């Protein structure tokens, strides 16, 4: 399973616009709250492979939150309401207070790299982080500049002045692996660790289809002309809040010409090289993204295609 996918909660979207119903969910004796401190979810369990999201009861979480702390209704786990709450107002809850010694507040990317959390809980943590992050960035109206307030259980903000509604933002990103025969195109971004190569990626632009975005990005970044584009899979990516749209593409040219300064380097890799690298090998210091990244799954799908 691709990391951050597989959220099994019922989002109860038809109910969360009802303030009375939301209040009932918060007061439910079985309600669970995932506290996030500086956008890091609480994780409990000292043994790797036996970790889980650190849910607490609402009263404990609320005591650690500031008066304007974002609280998001994530959904129902069966009949159990699940919330996320920002507790960044408290000072180092790992060391003092009711959560001290209970677990650790993990940076989400590091948590995904460890691979210890059940997939559905990692997906829940990703959604919680993306939503809390969005609220922290959108306290004021983009139309008139007045303060906004959280409504619909955290799935909307409303301007107190002009009454404009603002909804959580997800930025679509195309990430694509172009291939020509037995070779595929990979690139090393300027911000990548030394030696890491990956599939090319870029944000979709307004008025652009997925296929058009794939062709434009590959041409801009590597000078490669692309024909057929095929969707493969997608991945929610909470850094800060994107949807990675994974595609496979057929290259119609092979001369690499770096263009828009996004890439430090690009190269073609043979299928057998990719298979070896995905199995944990390295060639001249070169390595590929880990399984937490959708680029890994694109490379694997192409390398082991029958």
Image (spheres, rainbow, N blue to C red):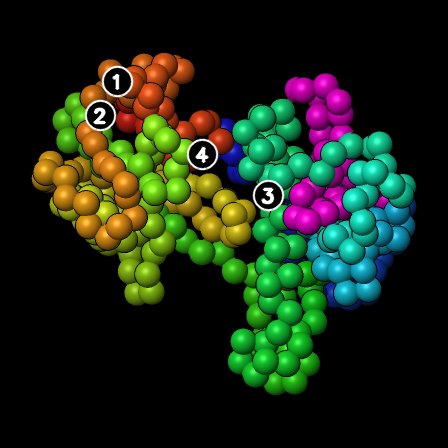
Q: Position of residue 214 (x, y in %)?
A: 26, 48
Residue at the (81%, 55%) spot, across then down: 65
Q: Secondary structure at mark 2?
A: strand
Give the residue pinned by disc 1: 273
Mark 4 / mark 2, whichever is N-terminal: 2
Mark 1 / mark 3, whichever is N-terminal: 3
Residue at the (29%, 60%) spot, across then down: 208
Question: Crowdedness of circle 2 by 10 Å Cα count: few (<14), some, many (20+)?
Answer: some
What whole-number distance in Å separates the C-alpha atoms at marks 1 and 3?
32 Å
What whole-number distance in Å separates the C-alpha atoms at marks 4 and 2?
19 Å
Residue at the (67%, 43%) spot, across then down: 40
Horizontally, residue 26 falls left or right of residue 261, namely right
Residue 37 part of the magenta-drawn span: yes
Mark 1 / mark 4, whichever is N-terminal: 1
What whole-number distance in Å separates the C-alpha atoms at marks 2 and 1?
6 Å
Q: Position of residue 305 (x, y in %)?
A: 28, 22
Check if mark 2's residue and mark 1's residue have beta carbons within 8 Å. Answer: yes
State the extent of the magenta-drawn residues as a range. Answer: 34-58
User: In which quadrant will I find the C terminus?
Assistant: top left
Q: Position of residue 232 (x, y in %)?
A: 34, 37
Give the residue pinned by disc 2: 269
């Amino acid at each position: 399973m691709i990391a951050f996918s597989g959220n099994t909660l019922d989002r109860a979207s038809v109910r969360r616009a009802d303030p009375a119903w939301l209040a009932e969910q918060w007061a439910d004796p079985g309600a669970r709250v995932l506290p996030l401190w500086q956008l890091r979810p609480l994780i409990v369990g000292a043994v790797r492979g036996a970790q889980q999201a650190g849910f607490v009861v609402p009263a404990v979480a609320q005591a650690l939150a500031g008066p304007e702390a974002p609280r998001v209704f994530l959904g129902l786990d069966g009949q159990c309401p699940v919330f996320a709450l920002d507790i960044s107002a408290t000072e180092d809850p790992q060391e003092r207070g009711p959560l001290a010694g209970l677990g650790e507040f993990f940076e989400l990317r590091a948590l995904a790299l460890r691979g210890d959390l059940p997939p559905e809980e990692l997906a829940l943590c990703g959604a919680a982080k993306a939503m809390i992050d969005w609220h922290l960035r959108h306290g004021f109206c983009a139309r008139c500049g007045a303060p906004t307030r959280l409504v619909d259980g955290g799935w909307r903000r409303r301007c107190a002045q002009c009454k404009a509604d603002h909804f959580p933002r997800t930025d679509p990103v195309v990430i694509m692996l172009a291939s020509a025969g037995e070779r595929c195109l990979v690139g090393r971004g300027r911000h990548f660790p030394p030696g890491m190569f990956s599939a090319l990626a870029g944000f979709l632009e307004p008025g652009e289809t997925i296929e058009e975005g794939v062709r434009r990005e590959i041409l801009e970044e590597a000078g490669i002309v692309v024909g057929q584009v095929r969707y493969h899979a997608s991945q929610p990516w909470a850094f800060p809040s994107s949807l990675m749209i994974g595609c496979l593409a057929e290259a119609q040219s092979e001369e690499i010409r770096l263009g828009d300064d996004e890439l430090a380097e690009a190269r073609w890799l043979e299928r057998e090289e990719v298979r070896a690298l995905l199995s944990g090998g390295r060639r001249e210091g070169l390595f590929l993204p880990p399984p937490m990244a959708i680029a890994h799954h694109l490379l694997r799908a192409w390398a082991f295609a029958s």
